[in-house]
Amino acid sequence: MRKPFIAGNWKMNMTHLEAVNFMQDLEYKYKNKNNCEVAVCPPATALKSVKTIIDSDNLEVKLGAQNMYYESRGAFTGEISPEMLKALGVEYVIIGHSERRQYFGETNKGVSRKVNAAFNTDLKPIMCIGESLKIRESGKAEEFVMDQLKECLVGIDEEDIVDLTIAYEPIWAIGTGRTATSEDANDMCLAIRRKIEEIYNKKISEIIRIQYGGSVKPFNISELMNMSDIDGALVGGASLEVDDFIAIINYQDSSDT
Ligand code: PGA
């Protein structure tokens, strides 16, 4: 059984002071009836403050970063190394988000270097893949995503891959209010799982967690989470509102009813 995993990607929102307020409110209202794994991924400037609150309140929430560089140290002005994240108590790191690819020129090759560097530092990557609207409309979405997957996984061995989370995020669904239908999202997650089986083996394909991301909201989370191959969600906008984020964590599991 794969443990459901819901992660909030705050993107470039919240100063560390706002993050502290958010976390205090989250702690006060926190409820996790599905016992899923929960992570928040604040901007780098708020990681330390968020970690302090998680630790002092014993909050069952993991800490994730939104990006990192693949080198350990050196003359890379403005970059943050995996070791620096690890030293702050970060457990997860989002890698290859479509906004990084779109605005900062990240490539599959760069993503694979970062995923490798994350594993070398005992960080667990949340690796994002997904197609644009143009590709979806051309009917080549699956082919495109499978190529992305293969290229991003170069150099990742069987031992590490089990700790990888894959986030399938169709770009046209991110921040647009337009979600993929749960069937379409599940079909792609299933195709990803089959590809993992092909590259690695069946056991690994059954362990690995695949999240869906793109306009996940309290009203659509339950349907998505009850699909066979969607194991969690990477949530952007709705993770910035404590009540919405809590509602998402507490989605309706159909096996409960
Ligand atoms: P969204 O963002 O939920 O605001 O669409 C998701 C993401 O980019 O990870």
Image (cartoon, grey):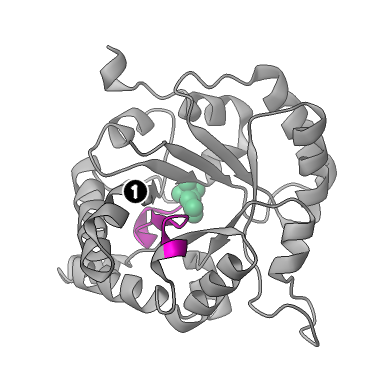
**Does 173 appear in magenta?**
yes
Residue 246 percent coordinates (x, y) = 55, 26
Please name the residue shown 58% across and 77% down the image: 104
Please name the residue shown 42% across and 51% down the image: 176
Residue type at the position of mark 1: Ile
Residue 135 percent coordinates (x, y) = 25, 71
For the residue pair 1 and 189, the one nearer the viewer reads as: 1
Q: From what the image shows, is residue 105 above or below residue 169? A: below
Q: Which residue lies under the disc numbered 1?
A: 207
**Could you tell me if residue 134 is visible in this image?**
no
Q: Quadrant of the N terminus?
A: top left
- Say left or right for 166 vs 95: left
Please name the residue shown 62% across and 48% down the image: 10
Q: From what the image shows, is residue 133 above or below residue 70? A: above
Residue range corresponding to the magenta coloring = 159-174
Residue 156 percent coordinates (x, y) = 43, 72
Q: Quadrant of residue 71?
A: bottom right
